[in-house]
Amino acid sequence: MSETRSKNLPPWEALVTVAHYLDPQTLALASCVSKSWCQAMSLDVVWQPLCSSSFPTLSNLKISYPSVPYHRLYATGLAAFKRRHKPPSKPRLSIDNIIFTIQLSTKGVPIFTIAEAASKMNNNQVFKFDVDVKHGSFKGIKGLEEMKVTWNVVLKGWEAIFTMMDWQGKLSCRAVEGWFSEELPCAGCCSSEVGSGIVADLKVDMKVEKVSVGILRVVDWRYVSIEDGLRYLQQFLLPCQCDGM
């Protein structure tokens, strides 16, 4: 029985020849058939062209580390590619669950204070929100020497709060509008001291009739999407899930 079975198995050379025509996924599956198939499907002569075409930089490592097989280099490159291009998960935080509190004051005297649900503020599918200001008879911010701007994001029910901006200083007399920005910290409990690459952005027109708040990417100065903004904020407003991963 065993002799008949061994005669039906393809010779070593045939396995290697066929392997050259298989894609990486099929090669991985074929290597599970038997030990001899695994050896044939794992040869450097089979994986070298695949690795060179898909991950040429990793393929060049073979020169410095000849003991590392090409199929291992390919697997490493593929894993890195999948991690880099993995689509982000849906945010756990909803736009309906956050409230923006914004206050502008000068010399300790509040000019206006806003507490508004983010879902009720105007936005254009990006994390930028506009709200009209009701401040009574205030004549505008132009010419003010000292100003303080505070923007907090509050979790519904006042269960958590995150300070997006706490700016204090002088506004330029040449400014056509009050534009304030502060770099935000890296998100997550495992973050380092490296910059986050995003800033909190707040604009006030000179007559203080409208306020705009948002999150900007430093790399292109565009507003992040609403989902990206919520994914960032949930790191500060919701319990960390790192321990459960």
Image (cartoon, rainbow, N blue to C red):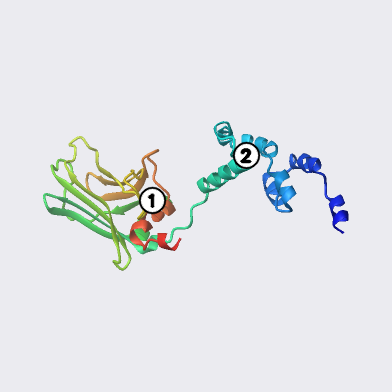
> Who's the residue at 20% across and 55% down the image?
112
- Circle 1 sits in a helix, a strand or a loop, which is it? loop
Q: Which residue does the numbered mark 2 point to in the structure image?
A: 70
The image shows residue 190 at horizontal and vertical percentages of 36, 53
Query: In which image quadrant can residue 13 be found?
Result: top right
Residue type at tag 1: Phe
2 relative position to 245: left or right: right
| Residue behind mark 1 | 127
Place of residue 76 in the rendered image (x, y in percent of width and height, measured from the top left): 56, 44
Between 163 and 24, the residue placed more toward the observer is 24
**In this orientation, does residue 93 appear?**
no
Task: Mark yes or no: residue 72 visible.
Answer: yes
Q: In the depicted view, which residue is nearer to us: 12 or 3?
A: 3
Q: Earlier in the sequence, mark 1 or mark 2?
A: 2
**Residue type at the position of mark 2:** Tyr
> What residue is rendered at 38% in x and 51% in y?
127
